[in-house]
Image (cartoon, rainbow, N blue to C red):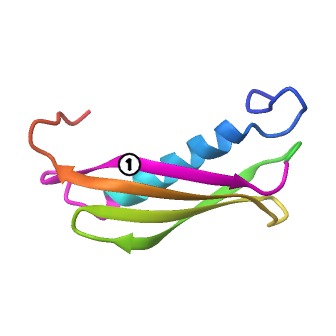
């Protein structure tokens, strides 16, 4: 219920937060953390179907992994496998110097 909006559906913001978390984690797994970091540049999402109960699953797929940018497609699906949200996340790849690891 914490992730539902007033009409009882999964909040779109929760879907976008999940999408950005998955895409950002996937992006970092492609980099050497001693040399580079991935930071969000742009995200967009289309909410295709509402979910009232149960859980959702997200899958990130690389569309482009370049030297300075990465583009990820994140699909969020219901327990039944129905598409709930499709998102595209663009990450900027920047040098790690000056950024503390936490």
Say left or right for 24 vs 97.
right
| Quadrant assignment, res 28 | bottom left
Question: Is 31 in the magenta?
Answer: yes
Left or right, residue 27 beside residue 78: left
Of residues 31 and 45, the one nearer the viewer is: 45
Q: Position of residue 49 (x, y in %)?
A: 83, 55
Q: Is residue 30 above or below residue 96?
A: below
Looking at the image, residue 9 lies above or below residue 35: above
Q: How many numbered marks are there?
A: 1
Residue 78: image location, x then y, percent:
79, 57
The answer to which of 69 and 26 lies nearer the viewer is: 69
Check the image and report above or below for 101 versus 49: above
At a point 81% along the width and 59% down the height, the residue shown is: 79
Q: Give how far across and how far down residue 42 sits, in percent.
A: 45, 49
Q: Is residue 21 left or right of residue 45?
A: left
Q: Residue furthest left?
A: 97
Looking at the picture, how far across and down is residue 76, in whole percent?
68, 58
The image quadrant where one finds the N terminus is top right
Magenta span covers which residues? 29-50
Q: Which residue is mark 1?
A: 41
- Mark 1: which secondary structure? strand
The residue under the point 85% across, 64% down is 80
State the quadrant of the C terminus: top left
Residue 79 falls within the magenta-colored stretch: no
The structure residue drawn at horizontal position 30% and vertical position 54%, both measured from the top left corner, is 92
Q: Residues within 10 Å of mark 1 (few under 14, many from 20)?
A: few
Q: Residue at x 85, y 47 (%)?
A: 51
């Amino acid at each position: 219920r914490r992730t539902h909006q007033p009409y009882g559906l999964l909040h779109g913001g929760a879907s976008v937060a999940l999408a950005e978390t998955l895409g950002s984690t996937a992006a970092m797994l492609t980099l050497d953390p001693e040399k580079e970091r991935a930071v969000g540049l742009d995200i967009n999402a289309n909410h295709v179907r509402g979910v009232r109960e149960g859980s959702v699953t997200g899958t990130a797929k690389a569309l482009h992994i370049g030297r300075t940018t990465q583009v990820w497609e994140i699909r969020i699906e219901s327990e039944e496998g129905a598409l709930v949200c499709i998102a595209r996340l663009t990450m900027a790849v920047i040098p790690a110097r000056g950024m503390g690891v936490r």
